[in-house]
């Protein structure tokens, strides 16, 4: 067993290194993402979960064509007790009074989209402020989406380099405006928390706000994200919680991002150092346990551990807001189990082959000894040979002892 342990450890450590390097190179990203989406869909109850963000949707620009409507919208949201108002675009029909009122309120944020010059696509700049804004600055953030993971948007950016300067995204800037310590966020895109499903955040039409059709309990102390409603001619995003082929409007993705930041429920990834430790623990556990099992029991053990990894991944995702690389754990579980079982089988075959060869050698020595006098019945052979050669009637042999 000690030999199995030593040699098996070499095999599984090699497998561990390959899986860890594969994870580092992103070979498991697609499978990990699909599993993340499936586990996100298995959401826990939405009851008693604090909601920090409400969406207000504008069907089209003509719905609020009167500049007074935009002023009324600001005053209505403030009257309802909203802690913050976030516009994901500049209203076309808003006049200077609207921006002056937003400046007075203080917690009104605007999203500025990015453009690139035709000469150099890497030369990114922000759209200019509308002329009605005036000279005094307004709180703003950059409107920028990260690259999708195999067509699925799961992550949001923290900062974007614009004309040589690091600019916060709209969601991060708005969260910082309410005192969220965004400095602790990683520089890489982070996973947005979609654990409560697509319809968790409330959404209302802008006309309902203007008609005083909302109760203060819906808005008080919450951030309001204002954006255009979904429409066939507007590009949406595919996220882990989309309904069938229905795309999610960009402002809704931003609302979930802001909600994740305000509730401190951003999904964190297990870093590569801890992944290596976790993989090592799993492989050593397999090596110790599987060496005492037969092939059938090893298969059952592997199936059981796979289920355990899935349950652990779901639990960590929904309760600890931590995503562990379940695919890598399942891969090392299967690889180590197969390698250990294969090595044990080879060891058994070699032991059986050695036993058969030793038995055949001993049997051969008994039938054909190397020396005549090594035969256990050599005297009977001598008597028979002399009797047949001389045809004697009586024969006496005296053996010297």
Image (cartoon, rainbow, N blue to C red):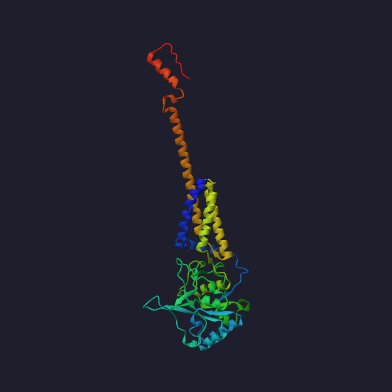
Above or below: residue 123 compared with residue 305: below
| Residue closer to the observer: 270 or 331 | 270
Above or below: residue 312 compared with residue 255: above
Q: Position of residue 120 (x, y in %)?
A: 37, 77
**Res 56 seen here:** no
| Residue closer to the observer: 139 or 350 | 350
**Res 330 seen here:** yes
Q: Position of residue 355 (x, y in %)?
A: 47, 37
Q: Position of residue 143 (x, y in %)?
A: 48, 77
| Residue closer to the observer: 245 or 134 | 134
Residue that extends furthest to the top in the rendered view of this protein: 393
115 with respect to 1 (left or right): left
| Residue closer to the observer: 335 or 108 | 335
Residue that extends furthest to the left in the rendered view of this protein: 119
Q: Residue at x 45, y 59 (%)?
A: 21
Q: Quadrant of residue 320?
A: bottom right
Q: Position of residue 158 (x, y in %)?
A: 50, 73
Please give the count of numbered marks on the rendered protein.
Answer: 0
Q: Residue at x 55, y 72 (%)?
A: 261
């Amino acid at each position: 067993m000690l030999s199995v342990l030593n040699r098996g450890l070499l095999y599984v450590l090699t497998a561990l290194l390959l899986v860890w390097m594969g994870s580092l190179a992103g070979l498991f990203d697609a499978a990990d993402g699909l599993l993340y989406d499936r586990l996100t869909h298995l959401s826990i109850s939405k009851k008693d979960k604090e909601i920090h963000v409400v969406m207000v949707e504008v069907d089209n620009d003509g719905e609020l064509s009167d500049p007074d409507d935009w002023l009324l919208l600001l005053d209505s949201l403030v009257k309802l007790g909203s802690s913050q108002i976030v516009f994901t675009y500049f209203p076309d029909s808003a006049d200077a009074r609207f921006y002056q009122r937003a400046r007075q309120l203080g917690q009104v944020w605007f999203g500025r989209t990015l453009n690139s010059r035709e000469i150099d696509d890497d030369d990114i700049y922000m759209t200019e402020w509308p002329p009605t804004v005036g000279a005094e600055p307004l709180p703003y953030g950059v409107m920028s989406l990260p690259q999708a993971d195999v067509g699925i948007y799961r992550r949001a950016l923290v900062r974007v380099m614009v004309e040589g300067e690091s600019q916060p995204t709209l969601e991060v800037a708005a969260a910082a405006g309410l005192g969220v310590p965004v400095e602790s966020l990683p520089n890489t895109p982070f996973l947005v928390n979609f654990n409560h499903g697509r319809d968790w955040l409330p959404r209302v039409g802008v006309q309902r706000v203007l008609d005083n059709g909302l109760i203060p309990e819906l808005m008080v102390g919450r951030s309001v994200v204002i954006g255009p409603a979904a429409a066939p001619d507007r590009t949406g995003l595919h996220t882990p919680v989309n309904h069938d082929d229905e795309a999610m409007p960009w402002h809704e993705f931003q609302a979930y991002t802001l909600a994740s930041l305000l509730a401190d429920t951003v999904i964190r990834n297990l870093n590569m150092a801890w992944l290596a430790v976790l993989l090592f623990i799993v492989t050593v556990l397999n090596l110790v346990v599987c060496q005492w099992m037969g092939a059938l029991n090893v298969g059952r053990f592997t199936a059981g551990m796979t289920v355990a990894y899935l349950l652990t991944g779901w639990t960590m995702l929904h309760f600890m807001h931590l995503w562990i690389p379940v695919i890598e754990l399942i891969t090392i579980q299967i690889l180590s189990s197969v390698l250990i079982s294969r090595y044990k089988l080879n060891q058994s075959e070699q032991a059986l082959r050695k036993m058969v060869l030793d038995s055949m050698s001993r049997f051969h020595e008994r039938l054909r000894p190397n020396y005549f006098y090594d035969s256990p019945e050599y005297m009977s052979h001598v008597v028979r040979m002399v009797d047949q050669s001389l045809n004697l009637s009586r024969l006496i042999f005296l053996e010297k002892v």
